[in-house]
Amino acid sequence: MKLIILFIVLLLNVALAAEVTTFVKLTPSGSFEAKTDHVTGRIVSKAGKLQAKKLLVPVDSLKTGIGLRDEHLKKYLKMKEHPYITLTDLEGENGVAKATINIAGVSNKLFGIDYSVKGKEVNAKFMIDVLKFKLDKVKYFNIGVDNIVNVNVKLNIDKK
């Protein structure tokens, strides 16, 4: 569930048209998605480069379709102490970006964020290793969460 952290995906300073989907694999089998359309901040495309100073995703906005799982996710992401997943210093060029992501108060660099721009929309994909965020191990009735979470993000951008 901490995997939902991935929703960190790109957030913006203006409520943008956004869709963040995190794909969480369970062990020994199964999976689920955590989604949100609540992203604030501003992402800009200028001279072929993408930039964002700070994007925010409220942890409370992440939904899996199951209320109990949503509550567990909020707990594992330490929502009371850290209500937002933040993405800062996003820079991208030629379909590859880098940024810093903060989940539950722990920051890590993200490299290799693949993206494409179509019109005023950017689609990005990246993976997050949840072990790098010092989260408690997730286990519920012998079902755990894989350490790698895949994140897909669709956001509107400002073109300058």
Image: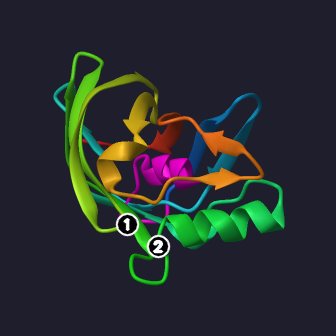
- State left or right for residue 144 relative to residue 81: right
Q: Residue at x 40, y 37 (%)?
A: 128
What type is the residue that disc 1 sits on?
Answer: Ala
Name the residue nearer the viewer: 141 or 46: 141
Residue range (magenta): 1-15
Residue 78: numbered disc: 2
Which residue does the numbered mark 1 point to in the structure image?
A: 104
Q: Residue 124 is drawn in which quadrant?
A: top left
- State left or right for residue 148 relative to residue 29: left
Disc 1 vs disc 2: Cβ atoms closer than 8 Å?
Answer: yes
Q: Position of residue 131 (x, y in %)?
A: 37, 44
Q: Position of residue 16 (x, y in %)?
A: 50, 57
Question: For the residues marked 1 and 2, what is the alpha-carbon distance in whole angstroms?
Answer: 6 Å
Name the residue nearer the viewer: 77 or 138: 138
Look at the image and tell me whether residue 52 can be seen. Answer: no
Q: Residue at x 51, y 38 (%)?
A: 153
Q: Residue 48 is drawn in which quadrant?
A: top left
Q: Residue furthest top?
A: 94
Instruction: Give the structural element (helix, strand or loop) at label 2.
Output: loop
Q: Does 7 lie within the magenta span?
A: yes
